[in-house]
Amino acid sequence: MKIVFASPAPPDGGALVVGALEGRKLTPSAKALDKMLKGGLTRAVKASRFKGKKDESLTLLAPSGVKADRVFLVGLGKAADLDALRLQNIGGRIYAALGAKGHSTVSVAVDAIDKCKLKPSEMAAEMALGARLRSYRFDKYRTKEGRDKKPTLKTLRLRCQGAGRARAAYAVAAKVADGVFLTRDLVSEPANVIYPESLAAEARKLTRLGVKVEVLGVREMKRLGMGALLGVAQGSAREPRLVVMRWNGGKRAKGKKPIAFVGKGVTFDTGGISIKPSGGMEDMKWDMGGAGVVIGLMKALAGRKARVDAVGVVGLVENMPSATAQRPGDIVTTMSGQTIEVINTDAEGRLVLADALWYCKERFDPKIMIDLATLTGAIIISLGNEMAGLFSNDDRLCKRLSAAGAAVHERLWRLPMGEEFDKQIRSEAADMKNVGNRGGGSITAAQLLQRFVGKTPWAHLDIAGVTWSKADKPTVPKGGTAFGVRLLDRLVADYYEGK
């Protein structure tokens, strides 16, 4: 879909979108259209239940004499509530309503609105971003899908004052959307297509944007002593990889520390010898969601030329049962020298992250380090599918992450950590065991990770409940969400870029 910004003009074909505020208050463009229709829009509104509230809409066929096939009246809600998120949702709803209705062109009239803090150009850019995010489809394997099921919208035209400013603002946001789409693609691919070697190859493509990419194989990881990561991978015919991505957009000065992001990349998780139930196991193709977010984030930062030095590290493995698989009771030695008794081979993500976090800390000495992982089912019991769990050793980093998440509606909820939880992962045979008691499973997993970050300001995001959506949302179609890409890009932009 092509997104175009243009100056206000009369309708010129396709579908026309105008707005109404709560209380059935038409915007200036809607009033002008109503005049052209000789009061037809007003009559249609009065004959309906449409009140102009958020999430409401009204569709009517355009009468003869108007150069438009369809009029779509979208509810804007209260003017004072028209912020960036609301406008993105409106853009997403417009696409959801009109993207597959047979129109090749949709024009959206964007007006200045009293009590709205955003200019028309800013409003148009946010609506365009929302429409772009909602337009995502993963349909490459639908070989028999009929034309009537596919989107028809080719051009979305947003008409507003200051079209040039809108175009410039959207150009930056579009690069972030590119990163979101990459993550959604990677998470959506089946495990016979995305496995450690092929996912590493996808990460290598970021070199086209100026990202420096290194891929470590088994030999290099053995030399480094990554016994925890390698132990998870030993049951699979697919060899593991550790991928290191560096974006030096801050023109890194000598001694300046980068910020770092670490992702769990279990490209398929059977549970290993502690095998999962078969029902729903197909969902475990997206157990590499954390790694997918880090790769998508690096694309977003490089794409928009972020003025920051950032490092992305992803540990890529496949967790399979076989004659060579890791067993419950095995003890592995991590790169840090600490040992872990493996009680449950389905608690494998923390083993992968243990070595990846230590490697990142030791090699790059980052200013902050944030890991993302579809780590525990317990976080879904705690927070459902609405928020990700946040764990940290640094209050300031937590506040910044929460603020960035709220700004893009990728919300976080901080959970406690402490000595009483740490006691639960003590082992009688090793330095620690990989699971604690039944209760507080997300917390004890975070406690284990904390043992591999040293004094580095660190946060762990458990995204198990928010990586995949079974229902459409305004800017997120069902499927892979890419939760975390926009959040972390916003964190960088607000607190670390250019500093």
Image (cartoon, rainbow, N blue to C red):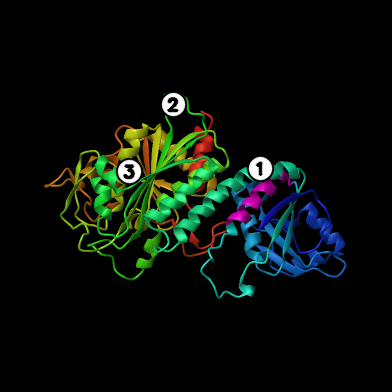
Q: Does 256 sit above or below residue 276?
A: above
Q: Which residue is label 1 attached to? A: 169
Query: Mark 2 vs mark 1: which is more N-terminal?
Result: 1
Q: Which of marks 3 and 1 precedes in the sequence?
A: 1
Where does the image place residue 212, in percent across and percent down from the top left?
46, 39
> In the picture provided, is 98 more to the left or to the right than 207?
right
The disc placed on residue 356 is: 3
Q: Position of residue 107 (x, y in %)?
A: 75, 58
Q: Is residue 448 visible?
A: yes
Does residue 292 show up?
no
Position in image of residue 418 (x %, y %): 26, 40
Residue 42 to residue 336: above or below: below
Does residue 117 belong to the magenta stretch?
A: yes
Which residue is found at the position 83% from the left and 53% from the top?
9
Q: Amino acid at mark 2?
A: Lys
- Mark 2 / mark 3, whichever is N-terminal: 2
Identify the residue shown where x is 45% and y is 49%.
203
Amino acid residing under circle 1: Ala
Image quadrant of residue 457?
top left
Other residues around mark 1 within 10 Å, as few (<14) / some (14–19) / many (≥20) = some
Q: Nearer the viewer, mark 1 or mark 3?
A: 3
**Which element is circle 2 on?**
loop
Could you tell me which secondary element the residue under label 1 belongs to? helix
Residue 84 lies in the magenta-colored region: no
Q: CA distance from mark 2 to mark 1?
A: 30 Å
Q: Quadrant of residue 49?
A: bottom right
Identify the residue at the far top of this view.
254
Residue nearer the viewer, 271 or 208: 208
Q: Nearest the camera: 54 or 225? A: 225
